[in-house]
Amino acid sequence: MTDWKFFTAQPNEDRTPRQAALKPIQERPAWRQFMSQAIFEDKWAGASKTRWKQLRDSNRLDTRSKERGESFRIRQSEGRQSEIISAINSALALRRPLLITGNPGSGKTSLAYAIAYELQLGPVLLWPITTRSKLSDAQYRYDAIARLQDTQFDKSELELQLLLAKSDDQPLDHNKIDELKQGRNLGDYIQLGPVGTAFLPSHLPRVLLIDEIDKSELNLPNDLLNLFEEGSFEIPELVRYKTDVPVPVRTEDEGLPADIEQGKVTCYEFPLVIMTSNGERDFPPAFLRRCLRITMPDPSDSAVLTHIVGAHFERKDRPKTELPWSELEPKVAQLIENFAKDLQRKQSSLATDQLLNLIYMVRQSQLSGSGLSEEDKETELEMLKQILLRRLT
């Protein structure tokens, strides 16, 4: 039996993340197999390995994604595996989407980046939800207007070539004529969105973040049911194309196109789908049945908050101009303690990133205001607290 504890969220002794690249998870429930191994090995394995070699290039991660992945921490309790980590590893093993509920600022979104960073699963594929979001738009986009314009241009170019050849009594350039008659590749006008890219045949799961799904219109969760159950979807424009030759299309990964065969995208390894919710609405039972659900706790304990703050500020790569952590620790500790007390009195009234903003500004204030009196420093601190710690509710 393969060890199913893939994600740990525990840093090394030097506080850098413990990066252990996720290897293919061979064991899977029979009811969560979407493509046979024989078909995958025959048609897609080579392309998948080439693609992942490029996806795991550290240069593909932008600075913000890397920072979010490095600094995220989950506080362990008495040496036991936390419920959140167990839910993530269960979602990977069972090939099930994960629905994470929690108050704003509890770390729901950052969790996706932490998983992708630790397990080296490439850039996170982000689908931010609005009231106008449609599943089809996140699967693929087809630029029919651009294709029509290019077809008209090619038709005019063909007529011009024939006219010039006839008027100048020169031989026709049959290769160019044939190329213009054949038209351009349909795949040039199709780009897979974050969902479509996540469901490409792959031997490793991509991390797909569907952010704030409770903002969607009512039917979107039901639209996702078939995709989650079947692990595939069709691109009608390519289905009508009727060709046995795979059609290359653009994807959400810049510079990494993918081949689509017979107009259908079917996953081999189900992506790690992380859906975040602020708990502002209820979801239908059929949708909930297909998801693993977890609630992100509010980090209202001062020890937990200290753990989170340390992950963001106690870094070896901090600029040398910053004051050492030890010189600010008493002031920071008091800010954390007061913040924790406020949260315990009223949950969801503040978000963790507000505390991080305040501590950052306090550090900057200490650097730039060394000539101020203690009274002026306290006045400035109170002003910063009023600006940065405004209640959310």
Image (spheres, helix red, strand yellow):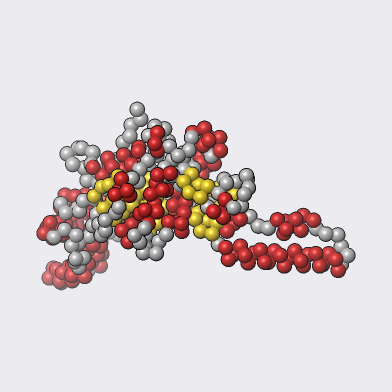
Q: Could you tell me residue 226's position as x and y percent? A: 41, 48
Nearer to the camera, 259 or 384: 259
State the residue at coordinates (13%, 60%). 346
State the residue at coordinates (76%, 66%). 159
Q: Could you tell me residue 34's position as x and y percent? A: 45, 39
- Residue 76 in the figure: left or right of residue 51: left
Is residue 17 in view? no
Is residue 234 in view? yes
Instruction: Report the residue that reaches farthest toward the top.
Output: 1
Nearer to the camera, 186 or 55: 186
State the residue at coordinates (21%, 51%). 297
* The C terminus sits in image quarter: bottom left
- Residue 119 in the figure: left or right of residue 40: left
Q: Could you tell me residue 16's position as x and y percent? A: 32, 45
Q: Is residue 210 above or below residue 49?
A: below
* The N terminus sits in image quarter: top left
State the residue at coordinates (85%, 66%). 166
Number of residue marks: 0
Nearer to the camera, 217 or 277: 217
Q: Could you tell me residue 312's position as x and y percent? A: 27, 53
